[in-house]
Image (cartoon, helix red, strand yellow):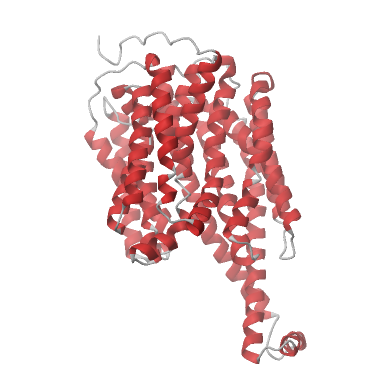
Amino acid sequence: MSALAAPSPAPLPPMQGSARTLAALAVSLGTFLNVLDTTIANVSIPAIAGDLGVSVSQGTWVITSFAVSNAIFVPLTGWLTQRFGAVKLFSLSVLLFTLASFLCGLASSIEMLIACRVLQGMVAGPMVPLSQALLLSIFPPDKAPTALAASAMTTLVAPVLGPILGGYISDNYSWPWIFYINLPVGLLSAWAAWRLLRHRESATRRVPIDYVGVILLIIWVGSLQIILDKGRELDWFESPTIMMLAVAAVVGFCFFLVWELTDRHPIVDLSLFKIRNFTFGVLTLSLGYGLFFSSVVLVPLWLQQYMGYTATWAGLLTATSGVLALIFSPPIARMMPTIGARVVATFSFAVFGVVSLMRSNFNTSADWTVIVVPQILMGLAIGIFFISLMSIVLAGLPPQRIPSASGLANFARITAGAFSASLFTTAWDSRAAMHHAHLSENITPLSASTDTVINQLQNGGLGTEQALAVLEQQLTTQAYMLGINDLFWLVAVLNIAAIGLVWMTRPIGANKSGR
């Protein structure tokens, strides 16, 4: 009998009591560090660039290098798990991630830092998918939503906390500490996960390495990620570099798709897309996360650039979304088997839609309360969105397929977030330029209203040039306010439309085959 046809061993029984709690905490801590590092360096780039003697644009490769290597290794989780075992791979990934973090802090040049970030992204790839697989294995089936709730908190809250910690550390200490803080937590997580779960190691087998699949994956995913990270900076398809990368991404993806669907031992299990709940669940998860991530990117930018907030205060305001998520996610997760994952997912999209509509009515006079209320309300949806959709994605799958399924789903989610960040920031600039042009049509140097404003500014002690500069700044602020209003209205519509995708899936348990 071939390795593919070999019978799977019976799954181990769930863990009990304090051992299960400690194991869940150990796994969640490791994943938290991983997700935190996707955003913690973002606000520290100016400090890193200045200290290492490079430009800020060169410094952004610290972010891009991690994102590219991480995106490539996430979908390889299934193959790596078969080869090394889930517990060993997770513990080793956390340990190597911690070592890479230490090396990042020691970096004395931009080249060394980028190399260490590539290593950090590579070893971080399997951590989130494996954490979900391990959590599901230690909880009984009826508590699967509770297991996913632990994963959801780390996956959705950590990106919000990253800029807060990064900004605080850069302002009060030095940039290497954004990496050094990983050391104690990472070592504890790796040790505890191995100590508590090593007796629950998954079955392994020697699977041939799909070298062609790996090379094609590196080509198209790497090209796509660089496009998404650098496209706005390089003026998108006006740049020959972006054009070449786009060709490489499209051609590489087409060859990858054909190869993986026909190879006997594919590096990525694309046959999962034959399963209805997996396909529509991943589509819905990707769309929802992309829309959520757009607010994670746009709101802090708007607050800092046009509302006068510091990085710390903008981060604190966005972090308020975690309050209701922490309060309501655990009880809703416990009730989800009764309520139904599709109903819970529908509720989360409805809340996201309402929050986006509230934001579409913001104006430049909005105070802290007006801005923070929808942010807090969004917490109702954050945790249960992830729990419900991952429950749908993984429903009915045997334990040995969960690492592959989780890896593919998280790869799609991460890619959707990158797409969203690039698309919405570019669209914001475009809409703002359009509104600026429309506003400028109504303000001419000879109009009475313009003269009145300029006279008021001059009476306040400004010269003519200074008064015109202030007027231009006010126009720009209003234009970007109107632009972000447009985008949040679109986000609201898309969130409501996503509910239709939710109901394309089957009820969990209605069809054990999942097809």
Q: Is residue 220 visible?
A: no
Q: In this view, does 69 lie to the left or right of 459?
A: left
- Identify which residue is drawn at 30% across, 18% down: 204
Would you place residue 450 above or below residue 435 in this image? Answer: below
Between 154 and 440, the one lying in front of the other is 154
Please identify the quarter of the rendering in which residue 77 is found.
top left
Between 227 and 335, the one lying in front of the other is 335
Please identify the quarter of the rendering in which residue 198 is found.
top left
How many labels, in total? 0
Would you place residue 241 above or below residue 188 in this image? Answer: below
Q: At which x and y percent is residue 433?
A: 58, 70
Q: Is residue 343 visible?
A: yes
Q: Is residue 98 left or right of residue 298?
A: left
Q: Is residue 403 left or right of residue 161?
A: left
Q: At which x and y percent is residue 192?
A: 43, 25
Q: Is residue 190 left or right of residue 323?
A: left
- Identify which residue is drawn at 68% across, 48% down: 375
Please identify the quarter of the rendering in which residue 301 is found.
bottom right
Q: At which x and y percent is residue 505?
A: 57, 27
Q: At which x and y percent is residue 358?
A: 73, 51
Q: Which quarter of the image is occupied by the N terminus? A: top left
